[in-house]
């Protein structure tokens, strides 16, 4: 495995506000990393730094390049969808393909045409004539026709209905992803992507709260539903979060051996959403 | 690099359809106007009809040449005024619209630098719009000369001789090309300024572009009681060092028209050497370069979130 992205002490401030605070991490190639955080956590700023759209302090290297200084070269091997609304509304589909073909050395027009043939998008249509879902399909078709090493998706399915959202991720996995490629995705709809992810990173107030492979979560985090004396005993083991559900205490443990928790109640691996809430709340307390 | 520029400029023309729609609209209006005038003159009096376009060459060669040259100048100025308005609106919109509709994030997701993008917009404003304008002028003249030739021929005159051989059209088209391209270069500091405002402003680019210029001119007049800024910046449009001094009285004196060259070739009124040797031209180009660099800087460093 080789590191595709390497960040060391990355910081980005706007005046007195620090959006990304001394963040360090690595992303290896062939992974699908979910970057999860509440609004204003610093996700988008971090992505912008990775994409060379904003400068930052610290050491940041993407495919061995300095993203801000070598953005043009970087963009030959990175694709990103920042939001569904970014395709220019005035442009025709055919013009869009002509333009991307002219400026992107790794774009395959043939592949884009094949992908678009599977949709209802006509090449003579203007983007403003397409529905929101179709605009996303168009954008994704373009992205999937670019032979890029890293794909960055920032809330790619925001505002889409459930059918388009499912289709979006299915297309991405079936037609795009392979071990040569890496995907970095941010979304609010964690539950829709958690099954796709190989790695997860939580970010809040500009700091990383969690950075872990998905398959390591089960070994580290455990959720126990307990009541009565069992709940008190469980509480004694130091849960990082506790809530009430159907009259039972639901407690989340970090780094506590499952053997110690067995017998105290129902045990399961927490969902990413629950883990995220616990981590963010824990940070605030 | 050149392929990128061509693709970027093509994109500008797709986005700003007014670049080619405006000349087409003016050409149509001028042609309809000429047709209406021909019909009106014809219906008014047969003598007037033939006098203007010289079907029977009653009035004389010089007058016919003067009318054709006047027509040439008049239509060219309509195009040039439209070009000026179009360039102002284009330059102010070029880096503002992409931020307003958020498409800047898409454009910046492709391997194209901010410098390449801003340069494509500068080239479009300084050269492409003027070039399209020249094509508009030439095509409009051609269409109208063909219409007038047919009209004259229908009246029994020799359109080939009376219309096509009386004025040096190639000279005049070349003159139009030189004037229009030189205007783009001469006014380029304004284009640079408009691009910078377009890249920077969050709202009302038109207001943000003109208000500071007018305010500086006014403040200079009120506080310093001088008008250096007003003369050199606001009044720049009047001072293009391309034209030879024209004796207006002689120009309109009927006798002097008989010095036929004045009336038949506009090229003799232009002095390209004087234009290229003028420090004001090159100072303007430098200012345009600095302001456009500012626009590149703003597009590159501004955080769009």
Image (cartoon, grey):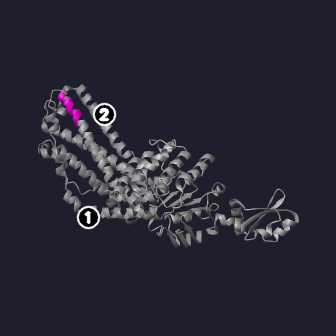
Percent of width and height locating residue B200: 46, 60
Percent of width and height locating residue B218: 40, 60
Badge 2 marks a residue whose secondary structure is: helix
Q: Is residue A182 left or right of residue A101?
A: right
Magenta stretch: dominant SS? helix
Q: Residues within 10 Å of mark 2 (few under 14, many from 20)?
A: few
Q: Is residue A213 left or right of residue B16?
A: right
Q: Which residue is mark 2?
A: B32
Using the image, name the chain to which the residue with label 2 belongs: B
- Whether residue A14 is visible, yes or no, is no
Q: Which residue is mark 1?
A: B279
Badge 1 marks a residue whose secondary structure is: helix
Q: Quadrant of residue B36?
A: top left
Using the image, name the chain to which the residue with label 1 belongs: B
For this orientation, the residue located farthest to the right is: A229
| Residue stretch in magenta | B145-153
- Whether residue A24 is visible, yes or no, is yes
Is residue A130 covered in magenta?
no
Which label's residue is closer to the chain start, 1 or 2?
2
């Amino acid at each position: 495995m080789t590191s595709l992205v390497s960040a060391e002490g990355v910081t980005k401030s706007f005046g007195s506000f620090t959006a990304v605070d001394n963040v360090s991490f690595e992303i290896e190639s062939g992974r699908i990393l979910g970057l999860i955080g509440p609004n204003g956590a610093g996700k988008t700023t971090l992505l912008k730094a990775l994409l060379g759209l904003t400068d930052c302090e610290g050491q940041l290297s993407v495919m061995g390049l300095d993203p801000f200084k070598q953005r043009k070269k970087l963009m030959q091997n990175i694709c990103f969808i920042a939001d569904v609304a970014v395709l220019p509304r005035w442009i025709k589909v055919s013009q869009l393909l002509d333009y991307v073909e002219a400026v992107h050395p790794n774009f395959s027009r043939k592949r884009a045409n094949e992908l678009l043939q599977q949709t209802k998008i006509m090449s003579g249509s203007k983007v403003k004539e397409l529905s929101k879902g179709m605009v996303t399909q168009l954008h994704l078709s373009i992205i999937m026709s670019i032979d890029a090493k890293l794909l960055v998706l920032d809330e790619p399915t925001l505002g889409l209905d459930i059918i388009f959202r499912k289709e979006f991720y299915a297309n991405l996995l079936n037609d795009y992803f392979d071990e040569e490629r890496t995907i970095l995705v941010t979304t609010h709809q964690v539950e829709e992507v958690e099954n796709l992810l190989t790695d997860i990173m939580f970010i809040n107030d500009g700091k990383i709260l969690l950075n872990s492979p998905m398959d390591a979560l089960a070994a580290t985090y455990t959720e126990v539903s307990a009541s009565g004396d069992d709940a008190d005993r469980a509480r004694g083991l130091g849960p990082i979060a506790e809530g009430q559900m159907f009259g039972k205490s639901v407690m989340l443990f970090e780094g506590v051996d499952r053997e110690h928790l067995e017998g105290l109640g129902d045990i399961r691996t927490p969902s990413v959403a629950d883990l995220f809430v616990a981590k963010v709340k824990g940070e605030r307390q | 690099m050149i392929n990128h520029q061509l693709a970027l400029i093509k994109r500008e023309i797709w986005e700003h359809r007014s670049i080619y729609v405006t000349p087409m609209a003016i050409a149509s209006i001028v042609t309809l106007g000429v047709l209406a005038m021909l019909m009106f003159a014809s219906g008014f009096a047969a003598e007037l009809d033939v006098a203007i376009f010289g079907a029977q060459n009653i009035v004389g060669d010089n007058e016919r040449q003067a009318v054709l040259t006047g027509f040439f100048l008049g239509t060219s100025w309509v195009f040039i005024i439209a070009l000026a308005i179009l360039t102002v609106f284009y330059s102010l919109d070029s880096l503002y619209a992409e931020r307003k509709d958020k498409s800047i994030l898409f454009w910046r997701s492709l391997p194209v630098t901010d410098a390449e993008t801003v340069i494509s917009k500068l080239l479009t404003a300084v050269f492409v719009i003027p070039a399209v304008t020249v094509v508009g002028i030439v095509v409009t003249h051609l269409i109208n000369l063909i219409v007038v030739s047919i009209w004259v021929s229908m009246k029994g005159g020799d359109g080939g001789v009376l219309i096509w051989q009386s004025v040096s059209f190639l000279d005049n088209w070349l003159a139009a090309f030189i004037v229009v391209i030189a205007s783009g270069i001469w006014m380029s500091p304004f284009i640079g300024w408009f691009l910078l405002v377009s890249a920077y402003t969050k709202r009302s680019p038109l207001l943000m572009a003109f208000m500071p210029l007018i305010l500086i001119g006014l403040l200079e007049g009120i506080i310093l009681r001088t008008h250096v800024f007003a003369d050199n910046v606001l009044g720049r449009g009047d001072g293009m060092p391309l034209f030879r001094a024209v004796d207006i009285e002689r120009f309109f004196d009927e006798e002097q028209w008989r010095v036929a060259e004045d009336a038949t070739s506009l090229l003799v009124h232009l002095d390209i050497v004087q234009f290229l040797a003028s420090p004001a031209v090159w100072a303007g180009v430098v200012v345009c370069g600095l302001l456009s660099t500012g626009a590149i800087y703003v597009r590159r460093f501004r955080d769009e979130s």
